[in-house]
Every structure is written in C-alpha cells, then in structure tokens.
Amino acid sequence: MDNSRNGDLLTDHEETLRLLKKLSLQDFLHVGMDQIAYIRALPHAGESGEHLHAIYAADGSQISVMESYDMAEAAIRMNDLIPVTVH
C-alpha cells in the first residue's frame, strides 16, 4: 500500500473539514443547491393508497410533486440535478 497516497487522502480530508468549518450558516444552507434535489414519498389522499413523490431543493424547500418516483427522478435529471431519496 502506498503510504504517501493515504497521507494525501488524509490531508485532503483535513483540508475539506477546515474549509467547511469556515462556512457561514448562510453559505452552508446553499451547499448542494445547484447539484442535488431530494425525492420523498408523500401519502396519497386517494383510495388506492399510492404515494405521491415530492421534490425538494437541497435547502428543504419544496419544488414540485409528481405522481410517481420515476417521474420525479426524470424531472430532477432533466434539470441537471442529482436525485437523492429521503426515507
């Protein structure tokens, strides 16, 4: 195993932590805003018991609601975001 590579990884990790600690609360709230959208199942009010799927921005604000997970994922990808599922 290459110890210098492990040292580089540790250094990168430490540098990342150092930079994150310097973020203001406002900056931290915007992390991922242009990259990530969350999908969360919502209970459906209909008789079928199916779920609607809400799409949320990284800051937790709701963007949209779709009839299926696949539709929610497609909408996110069409907007050049990475979908993340929230249970």
Image (cartoon, helix red, strand yellow):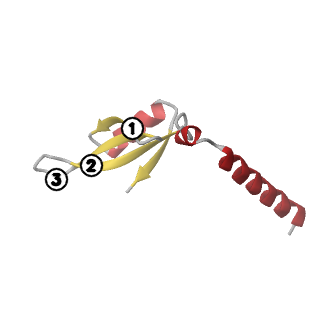
Identify the residue under disc 3: 49
The answer to which of marks 3 and 2 sits earlier in the sequence is: 2
Extreme residue in the left direction: 47
For mark 3, give the secondary structure: loop
The image position of residue 29, as x and y in percent, is 52, 41
For mark 1, give the secondary structure: loop
Residue at image position (34%, 45%) is 69
The kind of residue tagged 3 is Gly
Q: Which mark is residue 19?
A: none
Extreme residue in the top direction: 79
Q: Is 82 placed above or below 51 here?
A: above
Identify the residue under disc 2: 42
Q: How many numbered markers are drawn?
A: 3
Residue at image position (16%, 53%) is 49
Which image quadrant is residue 66 in? top left
Residue at image position (12%, 46%) is 46
Mark 1 or mark 2, which is nearer to you?
A: 1
For mark 2, give the secondary structure: strand
Left-right relation of 10 to 58: right
Residue at image position (37%, 57%) is 87
Crowding near the residue tagged with mark 1, few <14, some 14–19, many ≥20 C-alpha atoms within 10 Å: few
The image position of residue 24, as x and y in percent, is 61, 41
Identify the residue under disc 1: 61
